[in-house]
Image (tube, helix red, strand yellow):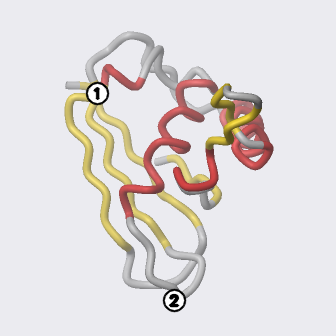
Amino acid sequence: MMVLPWPPTVNTYWRNVAGRVLISQSGREYRQAIAELAAAEKWPKYGSARLSVSIEAWMPDKRRRDLDNLLKSMLDSLTHAGVWDDDSQIDGLAIWRAPLIGGMCKVEVTTI
């Protein structure tokens, strides 16, 4: 199981700059943090295998949040870190809200 810091939501992950859509500074910083964690903790590499991903989202506070807004930055960052070749390999995806506050996401990946 990989424990990731709380990701930027899809609402803040992208920025429109001079007519181009780019990853925001917070998105780039998150991607870098995930790459560093993956290297330091020697996360597994799944290559091109078909995958199932389960995510347990520990909210940072009691504010209302949409779970689906977390997925894009998290999955793209795991791709960028080399955990898998591309997130299009994911055939099963589940996300649920943890009962406690913690400001992190626990991610479990299995091959299909």
Disc 1 designates what residue?
51
- Give the mark nearest the N terminus, 1 or 2: 1
Instruction: Locate the C terminus and report the quarter of the image it occupies.
Output: top left
Q: Secondary structure at mark 1?
A: strand
Whether 48 is drawn above or below 26: the answer is: above
The reply to whether the C-beta atoms of the residues labelled 1 and 2 are less than 8 Å apart is: no
Percent across and percent down for residue 19 are 68, 28
Which of the numbered marks, if any, corresponds to residue 84?
none
Q: Could you tell me how far apart the alpha carbons at marks 1 and 2 are, in whole angstroms? A: 31 Å
Which of the numbered marks, if any, corresponds to residue 62?
2
Percent across and percent down for residue 34 are 68, 40
Percent across and percent down for residue 108 are 38, 46
Please state which of residues 72 and 32 is positioned toward the viewer in this rendering. 72
Percent across and percent down for residue 20 are 67, 26
Residue reaching furthest to the front: 19
- Residue 47: image quadrant is top left
